[in-house]
Amino acid sequence: MPCLEIINKKEVKEKFNKEVTSSVQNTQIEEVEDTMKHGTNYKKGINEAAGKMIGKEERPQRKSWFVKECQIMLEDKKRVYNKMVNRNTRQNEQEYTDKRKEACEIFRHKQ
């Protein structure tokens, strides 16, 4: 937890507080009447200050197994599902069931 070690230093805390204060003041140049916008400005200010002090941690790319074939199958399954929802017949329901099984099989093999 190197981030916690950095944050617990006194000089870093003081600098962080100054950064948050200046960032929030910069975003509140005009009067903000809406409470949600006011809270959003505080959140944005805190995140910006934290980004400057600590930096952003890059997350590893998720679902690397999800290739173009999976995307096409998912879109096809959604198309068949919408067809079934719009007109619920036995044939459309069976087509959706088959497509869902086929998609699950492809996803299972790709993982």
Image: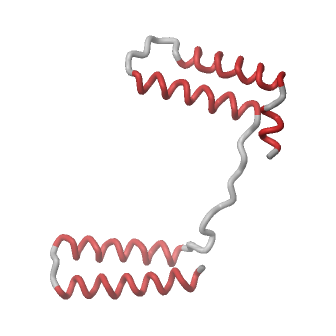
Q: Residue at x 71, y 42 (%)?
A: 56
Colour scheme in use: secondary structure
Where residue 88 sits, quadrant-wise, is bottom left
The residue that appears at 31% across and 73% down in the rendered structure is 79
Q: Is residue 6 above or below residue 41?
A: below
Count of marks overlaid on the render? 0
Residue occupying the point 60% across, 26% down: 45
- Give the camera-side residue of 16 and 82: 16
| Rendering quarter of residue 32 | top left
Q: Is residue 1 above or below residue 97?
A: above
Q: Is residue 50 left or right of residue 31?
A: right
Residue 87, percent across and down? 15, 75
Identity of the residue drawn at 53% across and 74% down: 68
Q: Is residue 82 above or below residue 111?
A: above
Q: Nearer the viewer, residue 53 or 30?
A: 53
Query: As drawn, is 57 to the left or to the right of 98?
Result: right
Q: Would you say 90 lies left or right of 16 here?
A: left
Which of the two residues, 67 or 88, is positioned nearer the viewer here? 88
Q: Is residue 43 above or below residue 78?
A: above
Question: Residue 65 in the image: x percent, y percent?
Answer: 61, 74
In the drawing, does residue 74 fall left or right of residue 107?
left
**Whole-percent x, y for residue 111 in the image:** 60, 79
